[in-house]
Image: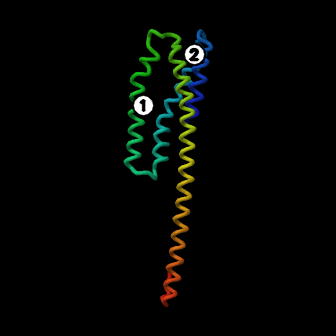
Amino acid sequence: MGYWIGITGIVTSALILAYPHSTPVHFAMYYWAGSVYACQATFFAWANDVLRYEDDSLRAVVISSMNMGSNAINAWWSIVFYGANFAPYFTRGMWAMIAVSIAMAVWTGLLVWMHVRMVKRREVETENLMTVGKENSDRDRGRDLQFGQDTKV
């Protein structure tokens, strides 16, 4: 989803900047750009999924911070970059959208990399715990047989 947002933001803003007097291009690009609003819910679900093995308090802080950040940006973004004095071309807003879209794609790549690394680390830790547990079980079974106790495990 983050890559979709990045690509959508870059392409739609660039085409609006490239064709400032084309009404069909503007309508089509604004329509396409509207698809990114569906991505917020997906990001929240992804964060929830990625943090499912972490402490509940960490997950709560991350998701509430995401919500707070979203609301803070939505409160001022349109005023700063899409004010009425910039109409009808909104050049500043289009350039800001391109910059933020690039940042979103990079940020998504970083999050995916960190998640994959965490999953691999968790798999290695689980494997090590299982190996240590099996070794301890085998050692305990040997000790029981040494002292004449036949235990079933």
Front residue (pair 113, 4): 113
In the picture, residue 106 is in which quadrant?
top right
Residue assigned mark 1: 70
Q: Earlier in the sequence, mark 2 or mark 1?
A: 2
Residue 116 location (% of width, % of height): 57, 48
Asked if 137 appears above or below 3 in the picture, the reply is below
The kind of residue tagged 1 is Ser
Label 1: state its secondary structure: helix
**Residue 18 figure quarter:** top right
Residue at the bottom extreme of this rendering: 148
Q: Secondary structure at mark 2?
A: helix
Q: Residue at x 60, y 19 (%)?
A: 14
> Looking at the picture, how far across and down is residue 81, in whole percent?
46, 17
Which residue is drawn at the image coordinates 40% and 51% (left, top)? 55
The alpha-carbon separation of the residues under discs 2 and 1 comes to 25 Å
Q: Nearer the viewer, mark 2 or mark 1?
A: 1
Q: Quadrant of the N terminus?
A: top right
User: Disc 2 marks which amino acid?
Assistant: His
Q: Residues within 10 Å of mark 2 (few under 14, many from 20)?
A: some
**Going 57% across and 16% down the picture, which residue do you hit?**
26
Q: Within 10 angstroms of label 1, few (less than 14), some, or many (20 or more) residues?
A: few
**Tag on residue 26?**
2
Q: Position of residue 91 (x, y in %)?
A: 53, 14
x then y, percent, for residue 10: 59, 24
38 vs 61: above or below: above
Q: Is residue 112 above or below residue 53?
A: above
Give the number of the disc on residue 51: none
Residue at position x 53%, y 28% in the image: 35
